[in-house]
Image (spheres, rainbow, N blue to C red):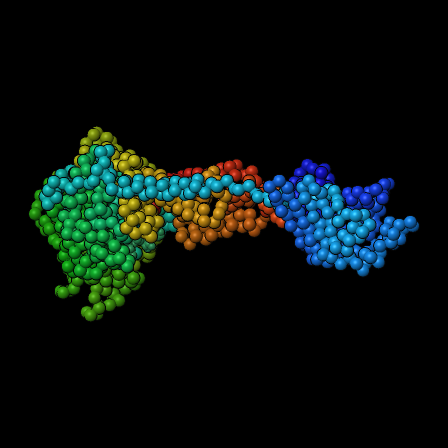
Amino acid sequence: ACVGFPLPGAIHDGLEDGKVANMTCYKGGETVFNNHQMCDITNRKILDMLPDRPPQVTFSCDNASSTCSFQFWTAQQESFYCGLDSCTSESKPGYDANSTIYACDKIKCKCIPGRFLCGEDGSVDISDFLVEEIRGPAKFSCKTGQGCRFEEPAMNSLINDIFGDAYITLNCEGGECLHYSQVPGYHPPAKPDNTKWVALSSAGAGLIVVLTVAVLWYVGHTHPTSPNAGPIALPSDPRHPPSHPEHVPATVHFSSLSYTLPNGLEVLKDVRGVARPGNLTAIMGASGSGKSSLLDILAHRSKIGSVNGSILINGRPVTSSQVRRVSGYVDQEDTLMETLTVYETVLYSALLRLPRDMSEDEKIARVYGTLEELGIRGIMDRRIGGSGKRSISGGEKRRVSIACELVTSPSILFLDEPTSGLDSYNAQSVIESLSNLARTYNRTVILTIHQPRSGIVALFDELIVLAKGRCVWSGPMKSITAPQLIDGVDGDAESEVKGVGGWLESIGKGCPVGFNMADYLIDLTANAANDFDDLDSPSGPSSNATRLPSSNFSSADEEQALLSGSPDDTELQTRIPSSSSSRRMSISSTIKRKTSQLVDAVRNGRDAADSRELPQKLAGLVIAYENSSTGRHLQAEFEAVRSANSPALASGDSTTPGEVSAPSNGTISGNGERVGMVEMRDVIGESGILRGRRSASWATQFRILSGRAFKNLYRDPALLTAHYLGSIGLARECRVLFIVLFDILPLRLVPPLLFGGIVYGLVGLVATVPAFWKFMLTLVLFNLATASVILLLSIAFESTSLASLVGTLVMLFNLLFTGLLINRETVTPALQWLHTISFFHAAFEALAVNELRYLQLKEIRYGVELDVPAATILSIFGLRAQSFWWPNISLLGIFFVTFMVASFLMLHFFVKEKR
Ligand SMILES: Nc1ncnc2c1ncn2[C@@H]1O[C@H](COP(=O)(O)OP(=O)(O)OP(=O)(O)O)[C@@H](O)[C@H]1O
């Protein structure tokens, strides 16, 4: 047994104390570090002369200093010793015997006085001989089966002279205590070569990437709606697209509309109007006058405040979902994918939103028809383009946005500032398209507009002018005859109802010749809205002829003239339908009563209901309008239409006809839905039924959106992320599903596979197949967990800056508790959960464990090679060697699922667009 001494840091590993693990006694003869030989002298003559005192020799060599020592013993008592310098050792393996040779150039010997051969009584004294004669070179050699010998020229001659032998012959036992790996000739077993398997795994990862791309390519290039997938086919004759036979004209009447914000600010008050099929209805006013609010309310979009009043479509009150089915809404901002062509953009809208049972050929024909209607057929193959990649013009973009809505064949089209951001040429051409659309295809087009040029104003049929949320004008642009105004109600006269120009002249505010009516109206209303002079003051602020329309409409006399009703009263009598003369009387008296109430309030300097303090000149204009023939006629028309379509008349229902109201106070509930509605299918007509049919299924939507996103990916990968938001909007019900499935594949799975596949072998990570796939799994799950956290934050916080601040804090926290900066073991147990909830820590620990758990670290210390299991190193860093599947991988999965579910729930229940 090889007995050594315990080495610092060595692992005892169950061995007895004092025995070093894996040490062995090497007897091959070569000096690795320190070789020790213990030899019996075998020269026969010497043995004969010392029968009771067996002579022995010890011979030791130190490899590092190239020195050896020779000691001569009798009866285990040392007699003399020699130090040998400049030594070399050699081992010669032979076919039947091995030999080792230690050769030293120099040797110095010395007697131990009084010992045998060195002065002991009765023995020779070789002290002087040793010192003077022994010079070297000396040789200690052994051969298998022949024993060893020690040779030195002077020593040899002495042995020869006295004992008759040529040299000292020896029988030796010797060796060296070595770690098995240090034994000469030891070759560490070759590591199993898994390179090909790891390379195969990398190729597998590459295959997944290729398959993913192939799948995405497939869904991007195949038939998006039909189960019999194939390329999208053009209609047989796209030059003659079918029109929209299912479209049913819709007239929108609204009256007494008020909108109050939660803070009490009254944005709109007592607004009335009508929008007819075939007409372009413009809502005009200065900034902040309430145009967008009115448009939103007419389109039944969710509002944060409370809405009161009545909106009728074809004479009936309707629910928000019914309005959505028969209308389209084009926002102020174009949210189009820059990489798609005009045709593709409109096609995707059609495929996603038209009924699933409509054939694809029909949908494509509808797309061509819509492009034709809007005059963008010629640019259908051009890309939308964006900043730095300009393609189609701003006006054309607006028309593409309109086409996306129009392709679903809405009866009513709402547009918020369709000309904003456009030069006057493009603005004109967009409004011309809308005007043509309204006239040619009998649509009801309602738009807000800020300050249009005169060419555009000339295209308006109906105009609503707002100032401080009040209706200054709502009626035709040009004078028309009364019966045309009242649908379905008999008129008894062909009298003319004034347009806005005629009305202005009738109140002494005619638009100067050559002036743009829009500019004039905005200036007139803006001046009136900003003038708080007392109504009773003798004169208005300005009657300067050069300063256009300041409202000098302030004298009490003038106001009284308005109130007197002349000459409009007579006009009114002729415009109210003859069907009910008593109702006519009652409307007339109601108007008078309301008007005088309002003027009283203005005179007294108070208007309790109006939290936006109404300047008196503006109040005068409002009253003038309400008292005008047009204002009264509009109100009368509203009442007549409501009565004509009353549910009491239609179905015997006894509820008040036409009220768009909750039973209690007539407000529209928070989600915009109205209660107590009558069944409107007959009124909404085919258009509503068509648009109400179930649109593309989830699976189809997914395929269409995937295809669209893939197109975007390969046409402009940098924009992919931004466009996902747009896709989410269109995906509606399947939006999160879409993110989960379509985001995961190209963004969360492919990049780690690519990265891991390339890097794994290059950096020399553990070359086993399971370790490779565990590495990949960890990367993918970590990627998913991080993305899901960011998704949740982006949904939870409306403000981008707040979301990015919280995101940074979350990431910093995760980084802090990764396990690199703060050792888990050094944290008090009560706070160790901080590491548990860090997904960085989960991924880091999983990767470290995967790499190190089965590794054996080898270290050479004090000449001894140590085997240290890497688990020891892991524990020093506070990492747990058995934590791969649980908790780390499981935690990453749990984080991902939890954050995705939370994102879905938040999106579904809490994120609602409210304006
Ligand atoms: N959700 C809201 N929160 C706070 N204020 C609101 C809200 N909606 C409307 N308002 C206020 O009501 C007034 C009318 O707003 P609205 O957007 O309807 O005006 P607008 O005529 O469309 O203005 P612009 O031409 O500048 O777009 C403004 O003073 C606006 O600040």
Q: Please state the horizontal and vertical placement of residue 57, each as a whole percent of the image.
A: 78, 47
Is residue 34 left or right of 348 when viewed as pictured? right
In the rendered view, tell whether residue 649 sits above or below residue 329.
above
Q: Which of 285 and 762 is in front in this view?
A: 762
Picture quarter containing residue 909?
Answer: top left
Q: Give residue 393's quadrant in the image.
A: bottom left
Residue 915 lies left or right of residue 35; in this view the side is: left
**Residue 430 sits above or below residue 891 on the image:** below
User: How far across and down, in percent of the image, does residue 623 sit?
Assistant: 23, 54
Q: In this view, does 13 lie above or below 862?
A: above
Q: Residue at x 79, y 42 (%)?
A: 44
Confirm whether residue 443 shows in the render: no
| Nearest the eye: 246 or 28 | 28
| Residue 569 higher or lower than 898, as above or below | below
Judged from this view, the residue extending furthest toward the top is 652
Q: Which residue is rendered at x = 39% and y = 40% of the image?
A: 204
Residue 798, image x, y percentages: 40, 49
Name the image quarter holding residue 206.
Answer: top left
Left-right relation of 105 to 405: right
**Is residue 383 in sight in this rendering?**
yes
Residue at 23 percent of width and 30 percent of height: 653
Classify the position of the N terminus by image quarter: top right
Q: Tell me the residue at 20%/70% (across/down).
A: 546
Q: Which residue lies furthest to the right in this view?
A: 121
Please provide percent x and percent y for residue 453: 18, 60
